[in-house]
Amino acid sequence: MDNDKNEEQANPLEDILRHFKLYDQALDLKGSKEFNAAADHLLKRLEQDSGEVSENEPELSLYDAQAATSESLPADYVSALFDQKAELFDLKLMEILKYSVPRKIHQSLQSNNLGPFKRLLDLGCGTGLAAEALQEQVSYKTGVDISKEMLKLAQDKHLYNEYHLSEINAFLYQNHAYKWDLVVAAELFPYFGALEEVFEGIMRNIEEDGIFVFSAEALLDRTEEAPKFHMSDTHRFSHTEHYLHNVLKQFGFTPVEFSQINLRNEQETPVPGYFVIARYKPT
């Protein structure tokens, strides 16, 4: 009996299940101490949830794919994609893919002597990873996401004062009772090609001297013929540094920090990206 007990205490799956709230089947297996079965179940789900499109993952129609190449991914596609990935999102992003942006936001705001803030607007908030990193730096938090399942997981963590299920631009172009002094878009721009509309929406909702923090996947082609952005075969957009600087300037944002970082790992390869902190200073 003692050996069995020690094996249970040493089993790493127990910690994974406790901290990341995998869906009901895995939790039931954990409760019955069937750790090996739970491990098999988890690994199968992680394989299905790899960066590649699986047979269960929503696919873009030819029409939608052509539209996405020029502007952004269709809202219905993004919603379905993240509803499906919600249960394993934190586990995959933080533990498997080594996603670094939430920690980077916290550290860079501190190192640049920015904050504390009154109100956070977290665009594409997902399960609330950015809000978790900013717990001590902002008083009132608003989370916006297109995925109902992602928002449910964020609500379970009690991270935000307000939760809004909405497409991002639809939310930004509504009339709101107040503006925000901190706006974060940590994993948003890979689902938008052209960024002018979302930048204009953020400009409408941020206070003067407010801080906008975002990340973007890097399109490292620096030739004169390089497009402003490019959609990969995994249906994610990357953007050039030149384009990001241009849209910042166009909409009244002055960079405080503009750095190249590794956003996460995919198939054990770092994904290059840009991390930006900018102040809204309209002319």
Image (cartoon, rainbow, N blue to C red):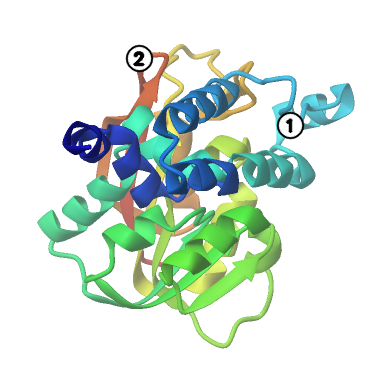
Estimate the x, y position of residue 138 in percent, counting from the top left: 29, 74
Q: Nearer the viewer, mark 2 or mark 1?
A: 2
- The circle drawn on residue 68 is 1
Q: Disc 2 marks which amino acid?
A: Glu
Residue beneath the point at 69% across and 42% down: 78
Looking at the image, residue 150 sits to the left or right of residue 62; the answer is: left
User: Residue at 78% across / 45% down in the picture?
Assistant: 76
Q: Quadrant of residue 116?
A: bottom left
Residue at image mark 2? 268
**Which class describes the residues within 10 Å of circle 1: few (<14), some (14-19), or many (20+)?**
many
In three-dimensional space, the C-alpha distance between marks 2 and 1, rounded to whole angstroms, equals 27 Å
Q: Residue furthest bottom?
A: 177
The image shows residue 4 at horizontal and vertical percentages of 25, 34
SS under mark 2: loop
Could you tell me how many numbered marks the image carries?
2
Q: Quadrant of the N terminus?
A: top left
- In the picture, the quarter occupied by the C terminus is bottom left
For the residue carrying disc 2, how many other residues have a C-alpha within 10 Å: few (<14), some (14-19), or many (20+)? few
Q: Look at label 1 and name its amino acid.
A: Ala
Residue at horizontal 86 percent and vertical 21 percent from the top: 62
Q: Secondary structure at mark 1?
A: helix
Q: Nearer the viewer, residue 94 or 110?
A: 94
Question: Considering only order in the chain, which callout, 1 or 2, is on the residue closer to the N terminus?
Answer: 1
Where is residue 73? Give x, y as percent.
Answer: 71, 37
Residue 35 shows which numbered tag?
none
Q: Position of residue 41 (x, y in %)?
A: 53, 29
Q: In the picture provided, is 266 more to the left or to the right than 8?
A: right
Residue 256 seen from this side: no
